[in-house]
Image (cartoon, grey):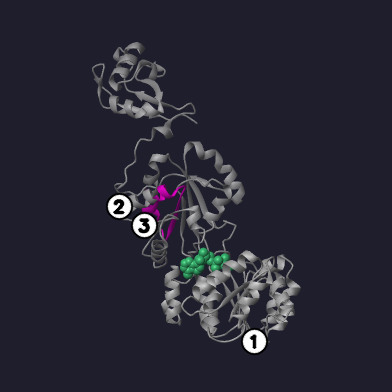
Amino acid sequence: MRFDELPLSEPLLRALAEMGYEEPTPIQEQAIPIALRRRDIVGQAQTGTGKTASFGIPIVELVEAQGNGVEALVLVPTRELAEQVGEELGELARFKGTGIVPIYGGVSFGPQLKGLKEGGRVVVGTPGRIMDHVRRGNLDLRHVRILVLDEADRMLDMGFIDDIKWILKQVPKESQKMLFSATMPGIIKGISRQFLPDHETIQVSEDRLTVEGTDQSYIKVGYRNKVWALYRVLEAEKPELAMVFCRTKHEADKVAKLLKGHGFACEALHGDMPQGARNRVMQGVRDSTIKVLVTTNVAARGIDVLHTSHVINYDLPEDPEWYVHRVGRTGRMGRAGKAITFVTKEEEKFLGDIAQTAGTKIELRQVPETGARDKVQKVLDFFEYADRTGMVHFRIDIGRKDNVSMMQLFQALSRASGLHDQDLGKVQVYEGYSEFEVPRELARRVYQGVHRRVILGKPVRLAVVERKY
Ligand code: ADP
Ligand code: MG
């Protein structure tokens, strides 16, 4: 849905466009039409879901800019929020010219009084200072037609319950009331029943902090083969929507580009992208034209997409808590979801902690077979093959039966791969084959110089011997 599909006036649409808001968030989509009908609302949605504009847009639409006195009152818990919400309302009202006055304690009364006298139509403030102004006769609440309690749970936490009740009793009984909160403790439900008996409830699903019900597994894969493994997983799973989490923006870009190049409906989403581009990507996600979203922890924070079928941890999250946040994005609304985590050999030891934090089992699984030719090729990842000391172990099919001595083989291998003698580790010659080790940084060079070449007069093959880590 776009903002211009809502019954909003031209000056407001223009303001939204300038603010870079292209489409309403879920709570905005639900709350705005109801609020415009002057209905009471109790809205619950987690932080960052756009609750401010959910009441800010209706206020700017419903309050006549040129009238007299205070017509809308927004109560917030802190002065920072008074400033912040006041600012957002100011931006929304930019082309209507509605006077917005922030009011909070700790500063002198003078400028606030001036704002009220000079046509302030909307007051955004903290309860204590608002009461002060009312008692001093600076602020008349008898003509308030819209009252908003923003961040109601925080206001109660801060001990404003009596102040709020006092203010609620000062405004006309028939005024429109809206209450927004991230959580709904009993005391807020009580206030809602008492002061907004005939409200509409709007709820936007919150991040669950449990991940049970989501099928969780991990795949052991080296860094260089993660794109290959991801390709296989996507081919095999055909997700409705996969969110792929990378550690960095750069990595997210790289992965998205590679997958796109192989024909996947895939886009990156991260904080370096301009808001317009981010909005376009999110639209694609909602329209299901994008099936794979490659993102980072931070960028994913505000995203709420219910049809996420797969969460893929391309990189292991730094913090076990983040695992839960990421995986909690799938398996919602009673759907079965899958979470697949890629771990390198060195990272495997962190899985225990993560599983414990998440309170679940994370089972080892293999990279799926697709039965078709891979578009993304698996490569030799010598860093993944290295042992704890960083050595890669090779087996070569030449041995005593070929009349080869340890010294001869040692020299032949050094020559073929262009290494210094000291770079080559232990060489052991057995009957039918031999084994030797090289530092992982040099493994590729050795492989290229030796595999399928002629060594000591014989065409040879090299294989990596994986050691227990
Ligand atoms: P909440 O009060 O639910 O915690 P806010 O109203 O403070 O959330 O909004 C969170 C952020 O999202 C703000 O930076 C705000 O500017 C931005 N935002 C809100 N609505 C939209 C929208 N429709 N499009 C783009 N950004 C939005
Ligand atoms: Mg808020």
State the residue at coordinates (45%, 69%).
19
Tally of marks: 3
Relative to 257, 79 lies left or right: right
Q: Do the residues labelled 2 and 1 touch (CB within 8 Å)?
A: no
State the residue at coordinates (36%, 57%).
266
Q: Which amino acid does label 2 sit on?
A: Gly
| Residue located beneath label 2 in the image | 261
Visible residue check, residue 334 = no
The answer to whether mark 2 is within 8 Å of ligand 1 is no
Relative to 455, 188 lies left or right: right
Q: Is residue 394 above or below residue 104?
A: above
Q: Does the magenta stretch include residue 40?
A: no
Q: What residue type is labelled 1?
A: His
Task: Provide residue 270's location: percent of width, then percent of height.
Answer: 44, 55
| Residue located beneath label 3 in the image | 266
Q: Give the range drawn in magenta.
A: 232-252
Q: How crowded is mark 3: few (under 14 residues within 10 Å), some or many (20 or more)?
A: many
Pick whichever of labels 3 and 2 is earlier in the sequence.
Answer: 2
Please tell me which residue lies in front, 297 or 233. 297
Q: Which mark is residue 143?
A: 1
Pick whichever of labels 1 and 3 is earlier in the sequence.
Answer: 1
Q: What residue type is labelled 3?
A: Cys
Please tell me which residue lies in front, 96 or 432. 96
